[in-house]
Image (tube, grey):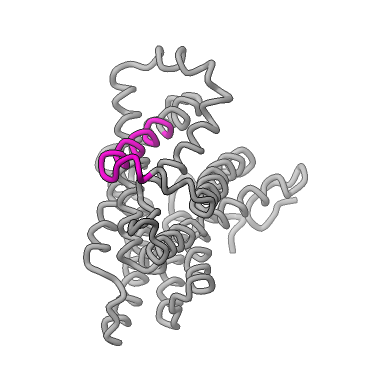
Amino acid sequence: MSSPIGLVLKDPGWRRVVPLGLYVLLKGLDATALKGLQTYGAAHPVGGENPISFCNVFFVAQLVVGLAYLLPGHAGIRPGLALLKPADRWLLFIDAGLGLFIGPIAYYFALESLSVISQTLLFSLVLPVSALLARQFLAEPLPQGFWISLVLIATGLLLPGAAMAMSGGHGDQLRGYGWALVGVLALGSTAVTGRAIATRQWPAVITVGVPSTVTALVFGLIALALFGPGHFHLLNLSWVVGVILVYGLTLSLGSNRALRLAYRHCSVATVSIWGSLTIVVAIASAALLLGEPLGIVTVAGLVLLLAGVMVSHRSNPSNQALRRYMP
């Protein structure tokens, strides 16, 4: 017997549904939690300084993720690195630079200047950008419904923006769109580097543990250079440490582990399609927890955007086997 989402339930369904549901929930809450951190830090400065910065947030978050993979698999680090050719090392370096450094920084600063809803909608462009970059650099064919998907996503993005402009709203700042563009290009590019890494079947300690730990240390050095050692002293306050560790442990590490568990029991296509629901969680949580306005036009744009995402996934040749489970 098959479930509605294409999972063959030969063992208890919770082994598949729970990790996938946790990933959707935790990843969807990421932007709302980070925006809440930024707002709370700005409203409660310590010594005249915002205790929440991109440096210490990503230092803690990526260090938690990196050590979670580094410590259990530390015995395989040296032999794993020894097997890497110079080109392999450059591949890991570029992937980490785009996905763990440039992408997160752009994500953070875009969120500083945009609402969670606007930021979430804009970063949905990662999907079509990934497809275009894979077409350019990997010669992968575009999905059959790609252009339909792109039109739906673009329309879904334009509707809320047009409504805000007509109402005279100016909640979003132009620099936020610039950072969003940088983030979309960086994260979209990791589809190319990530696919190349996946074909190597390297252990997680090499592909996740080492890059996450190294980039965490880079964020720490940036914090020292920009703010000095005193910036870390601010983290001694229990509320700052608690909030950032909750973000690092629960959302960053939790969503990463949940995603890996989901991939153990679900197909890539299933995870991709249902992972699109993170957009819904992000927008709903921003409206409920941060009080961001959620009008009928924004809802209509969200529906169109999700339709575009679904068309892109279902038109992908690698997802053909999933069609029989979808309405």
Q: Residue at x 33, y 56 (%)?
A: 49
**Is the stretch drawn in magenta largely helix, strand or loop?**
helix
Q: Residue at x 44, y 71 (%)?
A: 302
Q: Residue at x 40, y 66 (%)?
A: 43
Q: Position of residue 212 (x, y in %)?
A: 42, 34
Is 273 placed left or right of 212 in the picture? right
Residue 216 is a magenta residue: yes
**What is the magenta range?**
212-231
**Residue drawn at (40%, 13%), measured in percent from left and top?**
83
Quadrant assignment, res 145: bottom left
Total labels: the figure holds: 0
Is residue 149 in view from this perspective? yes
Pick the residue in front: 214 or 89. Answer: 214
Residue 47 vs 191, above or below: the answer is below
Q: Position of residue 121 (x, y in %)?
A: 38, 65
In-image side of 154 versus 325 (left or right) = left
Where's residue 93, x and y in %? 31, 30
- Picture quadrant of residue 151: bottom left
Position in image of residue 47 (x %, y %): 36, 56
Comparing 137 with 315, the one in front is 137
Q: Magenta stretch containing residue 115, yes or no?
A: no
- Closer to us: 196 or 4: 196
Answer whether residue 139 is visible to the viewer in this image.
no
The quadrant of the image that shows the C terminus is bottom right
- Identify the residue at the far front of this view: 47
